[in-house]
Image (cartoon, grey):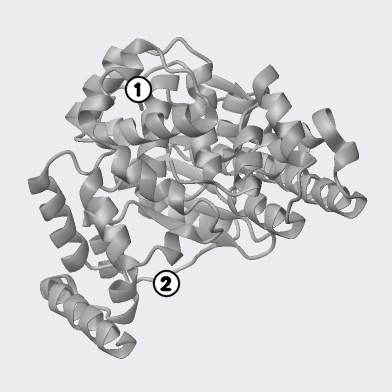
Amino acid sequence: MPPLAPEVRLLLCAGRMALDERAQAEFGELLRSPLDWTFLLELASAHGLVPLLYQHVEDTGADAVPPHVLTMLWAAQEVTSRRNQAMSRELLRVLDLLEHYGIACLPYKGPTLAQAVYGDVAMRQFSDLDILVRCKDVPRARQLLAKAGYAPAHVLTRHAEAALLRSRLHYHTMLLHAGTGVAVELHWRTDPVRAVESSCPDVWTRGTRTDFRGTRIRAFSRDELLLVLALHGSKHHWSGLGWLVDISELVRQGGHDWSWIWKVAQRLRARRRLALGLHLAQALLGCPLPDAARQPIAALGVDAMAEAICADLSRPDAYAARGAVARARLDFMLCDTRLEGTRALVHSLLAPTMAELTRWHLPRALQFLYVPLRVGRLVGKHLRGG
């Protein structure tokens, strides 16, 4: 692991619900060392760790923090807490609306993840509400949410929306509430290629539900959720430490069926993605991995990817700053086989994105033209950049 800035090391210490004796000692020592407080606050916000940082500063060493920094931390956490409470209420309103009209929906990440993993919706930063529905229900769900004040972030024609739902690259659409600014990501898959729910055929029919703020809602099992989170974090190259903390805290809860988890990961061709998330959780956050979780990791060769990710931890905009070529290289390395990596790279270059779907409104008979249009747009962008 490359040398880490003290601000990053402090955040890594803070990235857990409970500090053991060793982590608590290191956290206190780092708090009393020379720190760039402005950089620390920027980094904590970018990585989604303001709530945990504030909690541990209050518990361990508030006296070592400059008063104006402590005030800024308190204010940021207060804003996070109030916003999360409001978004939790809005989530229940949206779920009630969809369920009332017969649309089965499963919220994940956001407030339900905060409650399930941290025990408090205020302890995790999130920016939107992620709700999974069946693909066939997306158009109707969008119509219902439109009546509730939500407008699509991207205006698409009927044909373009159909192309979006058929695409292997896309798996959600964004809706924004004009009055509150709340964003809903309506998903028809949890991942564009490796959708965990595809390996859980009873996800829509099983009767078990979980309690969220006094309401019984659908939810992934903890093993399913672990896979969903690992795939999501790897897709973004773990550019946010908060996503890694989610994995770590879920693993710390214990009771996982690791045989099932690795078997499904193999079926989804996601073993390297899962291995990378678990390896980073152990190496950076001290997450204790049982033998059944740890043993397959060594054979999957994720050390080089972990080194590249760790090298960028001190950059608040790590994902964007990494550059398109470096991101493509990591995407290739994340694939379980070279053939799969090559296919994924070709597909990412040729499959139409929202940029093409919103710029050119083609009827279904002409949608094959999206491929040359995308290639032409990328070539033009590259030439202009050069």
**Is 229 placed above or below 257 here?**
below
Please indicate whether residue 263 sits to the left or right of residue 247 in the image. Answer: left
Q: Residue at x 71, y 33 (%)?
A: 27
Quadrant where the C terminus is found in the figure: bottom left
Q: Quadrant of residue 204?
A: top left
Where is residue 259 drawn, in percent x and y?
Answer: 27, 13
Residue type marked 2: Val
Where is residue 66 drawn, in percent x and y?
Answer: 88, 50
Please indicate whether residue 134 sits to the left or right of residue 63 in the image. Answer: left
Q: Which residue is mark 1?
A: 205
Where disc 1 sits, the SS reads loop
**Is 37 placed above or below 221 here?**
below
**Is 286 placed above or below 334 here?**
above
Where is residue 141 drawn, in percent x and y?
Answer: 44, 50
Q: Residue at x 69, y 36 (%)?
A: 52
Circle 2/circle 1 CB separation < 8 Å: no
**Is 166 placed above or below 248 here?**
below
Quadrant where the N terminus is found in the figure: top left
Q: Label 2: how many residues lie within 10 Å, few (<14), some (14-19) or many (20+)?
A: few
| Residue nearer the viewer, 254 or 1 | 1
| Residue nearer the viewer, 67 or 377 | 67
Please indicate whether residue 102 sits to the left or right of residue 262 in the image. Answer: right
Residue 155: which numbered mark, if any?
2
